Image: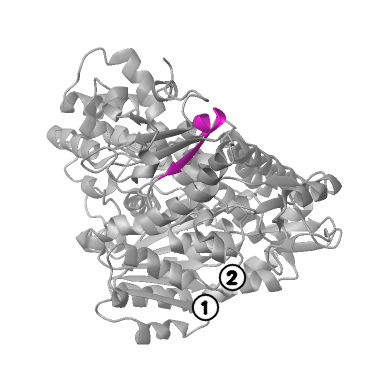
Amino acid sequence: MDDWREKILIQFVPGTYRKTVVADPDELFRDEGLYREIRKRGFSLIYFEDPVSFRFTYESDFRAAWDKGEEKNLVVVVKPDTLEFEKLPADVLQGAKRRSFYLKDIFPNLSYNLVSKLERSYFDKLFQAHNQYANQPLGEALTKEFILKHVFETVPEIIKKESDLLRTLLKRHYRRLNIPELLDQHLLSVLEKTGKFANWPLDAIVPDRSAFWEFLQERWELFVSSLTGKGVESVGEPAALKYPGVRDIPFDHDDIRVYMDNLFEEGILQTVEWVSAAAIPKPWMKVGLKGQARENVDLVFEDLCKNLEGNAPDESATIKDWLAFAPRYGRMRYLWYENMPQWAPLFSKRYQLLSEQLNGCFEAWLIKHYQGLYNYPSVTPVMVHHIPGYIAHRIMHPATERAALLLVDGLSLDQWFLLKNALMNGKGKMSLRENVLMAWIPTITSVSRQAAFSGKIPAYFTNSIYRTDKDESLWRQFWSDRGLEPDEISFLTLQGNPGDETQLDMLLNYRTRVLGCTIFKVDKIMHGIQVGGMGMAGQIKAWTDQGFLNALIEKLLSEDFHIYITSDHGNTEAKGIGSPKEGVLSENKGQRCRIFSDPGLRNKIHLDFSDTLCWDHQGLPKDFYCLLAPQGRSYTQKDLPIVCHGDISLDEVMVPFIEISRKRDFNIQ
């Protein structure tokens, strides 16, 4: 058996039982691949979480159909308490086939305590290794070594030199591997016993990706200073370093140099000054030096393109692969708009073809894989509706007793880099961790923003699916359901003008634990822009220079809030293909999506606009049928260019998810 899912799928045979209830204590059914395969076999799958929402779906979609004699196969999945099925109503259990599935049955020779801490995306690799090498039961200590070696390609015992350690950390953090805390503790213990890395801040830089990049940035400055003869006193004294300890690390080692181009080109590390007129920097260093970057603009752009082409995920990729790839794509677009006057005459066609190629790959992947993504557990979020659940998981930890979610309406990944540049001025006072999530499709405000504040899939806020004024009530409902009192929950909307942050003074009090906030400035810029993406980037940069965002974050940090920044959708440039006369326009100027209540009418328009894409997935409300515009196109006057949103491009779907704190508390598990 090559796939761990087969042990479960063998139990699902269409036509045997119309109703199956599953006890899933380890949340195996959150796996996208398992969800997709069960759907392929003709089953609908519902997670029993919110009893009210479940009852509505159960009655309207299934009981009504069964009463009419229709054949529908339903799987109800529940995460049990003490007893397997005690949460489920009696009428749901009546006549149902009952099944229970456990992680220990899939990996019988490994420690359950450790395997249960892994993200589900690592199970495929672990299952292959388990079948090949785990021939007998392994205890907890051996399971730690087994998982580190076979899943994360890390063998602590062979880390003997500083270059070994640095290579291991670069590989881990560049690939965005999420290694459980218990495995990190084992790795740290082995490294400590060697006695060779006592002056490395391992407790910070091993588990925390953002801490490692900050550490590397500090050491790059020291490395460059040592070669220029400037001396390192100004940046090298322990009090001046955020991460005291080892001063010289082997950037010039062959295994380390291979990472340097990508780290600087992708904006992970920032360039520093080369101040010596006498000394000449080595060629490999120039990518990390201000004023010394390669002068040949052809090579700079070609390197960016080759990096993206060589690392683009394919149709077999996981959601984690695309989330890791998206920042590189966003960085490319940010640099394109920044250098457009120089690059456009030479590379417009190259840029356009690359964008079309990457978005074509992403669209093909979405069509195949999107269906099960919303089922992921919120503790490892992949979509915007997971955000409240993720915050709820973390707010129970003493280090993050207060949390603020700042949703910058319409902010795309490339535009996040503009905000990041503005925040870097205060970087020494805060810790920043960057991630990416997927917006809901269609990428319109009434769908995706409500999902982000409610913590629910759109099918569960059907009554407000065309509205944009219910964010606060949905936010308050989410936190009230989790036991917070009304005066512990706050919400406000801000235009994003200088001084708007002072509105917090009237809102917050000592009991406030969670704050939700929508910031409209980027969306307002987008819907008023007349000069395309470069013009929009210029206006956003001008907005960040006004200092509102820095002031807002500084105020929240001073009140001990852990801050989350995200967006409900991005935006893209598109040209018109004409406007269908039927269908509800998704938003006044969000002209990449048409929504219909009648699938027949939608399909008729699809015949007239044959390159469009019909989109209706489980998770959206009933009678909500979308017709998405072709890549790079919009439902506007023919060939009229516009900046808009609503569709499934990387620019619209992938949004930033940023955590900011004064404390280093990112690794709560």
Q: Quadrant of the N terminus?
A: top left
Along the line of sight, the residue nearer the viewer: 444 or 91? 91
| Residue placed under numbered mark 1 in the picture | 496
Label annotation for residue 375: none
Does residue 391 lie above or below 258 as drawn?
below
The location of residue 589, given as percent across then percent down, is: 71, 67
Q: Quadrant of residue 590?
A: bottom right
Q: Residue at x 49, y 32 (%)?
A: 18
Range shown magenta? 36-47
Does residue 288 lie above or below 85 as drawn?
below
Give the amino acid at mark 1: Gly
Along the line of sight, the residue nearer the viewer: 430 or 636? 636
Q: Residues within 10 Å of mark 1 (few under 14, many from 20)?
A: many
| Residue placed under numbered mark 2 in the picture | 522
The location of residue 392, given as percent across then percent down, is: 32, 59
Q: Residue at x 34, y 15 (%)?
A: 131
Along the line of sight, the residue nearer the viewer: 103 or 660? 103
Marks 1 and 2, how far apart at CA: 9 Å
Give the amino acid at mark 2: Val
Along the line of sight, the residue nearer the viewer: 140 or 479? 479
The reply to whether residue 568 is in sight is no
Q: Secondary structure at mark 1?
A: loop
Residue 371: in magenta span: no
Q: Earlier in the sequence, mark 1 or mark 2?
A: 1
The figure's colour scheme reads: one colour
Label tally: 2
The location of residue 201, given as percent across then percent down, is: 22, 48
The reply to whether callout 1 and callout 2 are in contact (CB within 8 Å) is: yes
The location of residue 58, given as percent across then percent down, is: 47, 47
Q: Residue at x 72, y 49 (%)?
A: 599
